[in-house]
Image: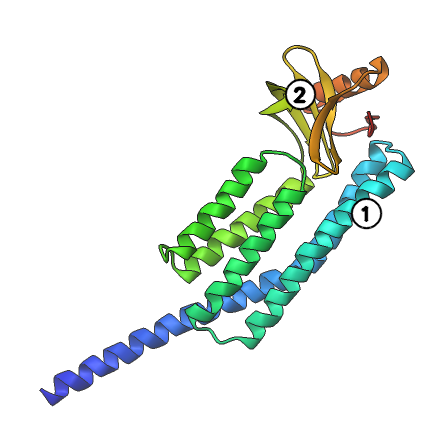
């Protein structure tokens, strides 16, 4: 009987140690991911600058858009740095890591809400789903951490890519299923089936989809769409940055 008790204690200790080691390894991995964010964002910003130069965007308009993007990047990076510090100071107990992950998920949601209106509902729904599962304790800390970093990687990928998609957008008070081109997370252009061509603009009330009135801007945008359809991604493209 005494031997059985000792054996059970030994097995429980071994299992607890393995679980703690697994969680510790995940914390270390998360810390490394956070440390890489600063360098990755610098790299992405440089790439966006190069892409914008290729697209011949006017300096004054570029400076304004970059300032807005830098503000959003700074806000998220501050949250990431705070998470890094707290991970380094906290223990590896799951109940201590859970609020850190929840806080970072909320910061990511704020980031998405301030970004281009590209599939925002879907992106926010993914974050909300993770938050709901954590609130209801339906997901482990390790799995939540994996899903959160996957969402962050998705946002970083969107900031790198210039791509063609279809999504429903409101133009002149009506919903349209339109082709849209996303230039990183700086510009979003659209072309509706009814022939309207324009871009997304942000004012104090939020994002609006406005059609170009000038024929030259319409033609430049349509040429850009056709180039992407033909997978021509090299060369100089002149696209409008204002209505």
Seen as rendered, the residue at the extreme bottom is 2
Location of residue 242 in the rendering, given as x and y in whole percent from the top left corner: 83, 28
Callout 2: 10 Å neighbours few (<14), some, many (20+)? some
Name the residue: 33% across, 75% down: 16
Q: Residue at x 86, y 33 (%)?
A: 57
Q: 10 Å neighbourhood of mark 1: few (<14), some, or many (≥20)?
A: few
Q: Work out whether 136 lies above or below 228.
A: below
Q: Dot 1 lies on which element?
A: helix
Q: Is residue 7 above or below residue 200?
A: below
The residue shown at (51%, 53%) is 148
Badge number at residue 12: none
Nearest-to-viewer mark from 2 and 1: 2
Q: Quadrant of residue 199?
A: top right
Q: Is residue 43 visible?
A: no
- Quarter of the picture containing the N terminus is bottom left
Quadrant into which the C terminus falls: top right
Report the residue marked by disc 2: 171
Q: According to the image, label 1 marks what residue?
A: 67
Q: Is residue 156 above or below residue 19?
A: above
Q: Nearer the viewer, residue 76 or 55?
A: 76
């Amino acid at each position: 009987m005494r031997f059985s008790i000792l054996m059970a204690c030994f097995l429980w200790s071994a299992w607890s140690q393995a679980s703690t080691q697994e969680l510790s390894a995940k914390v270390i991995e998360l810390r490394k991911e956070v440390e890489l964010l600063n360098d990755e964002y610098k790299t992405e910003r440089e790439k966006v600058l190069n892409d914008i130069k290729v697209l011949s965007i006017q300096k004054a308009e570029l400076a304004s858009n970059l300032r807005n993007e830098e503000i959003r990047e700074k806000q998220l990076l501050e949250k990431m740095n705070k998470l890094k510090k707290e991970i380094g100071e906290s223990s590896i107990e799951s109940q201590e890591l859970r609020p850190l992950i929840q806080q970072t998920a909320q910061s990511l949601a704020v980031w998405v809400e301030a970004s281009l209106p590209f599939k925002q509902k879907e992106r926010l729904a993914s974050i909300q789903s993770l938050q709901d599962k954590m609130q209801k304790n339906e997901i482990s800390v390790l799995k939540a951490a994996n899903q959160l970093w996957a969402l962050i990687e998705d946002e970083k990928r969107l900031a790198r890519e210039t791509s063609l998609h279809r999504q429903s957008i409101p133009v002149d008070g009506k919903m349209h299923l339109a082709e849209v081109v996303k230039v990183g997370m700086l510009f979003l252009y659209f072309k509706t089936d009814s022939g309207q061509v324009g871009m997304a603009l942000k004012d104090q009330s939020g994002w609006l989809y406005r059609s170009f009135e000038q024929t030259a801007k319409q033609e430049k945008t349509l040429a850009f769409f056709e180039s992407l359809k033909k997978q021509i991604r090299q060369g100089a493209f002149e696209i409008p940055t204002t209505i």
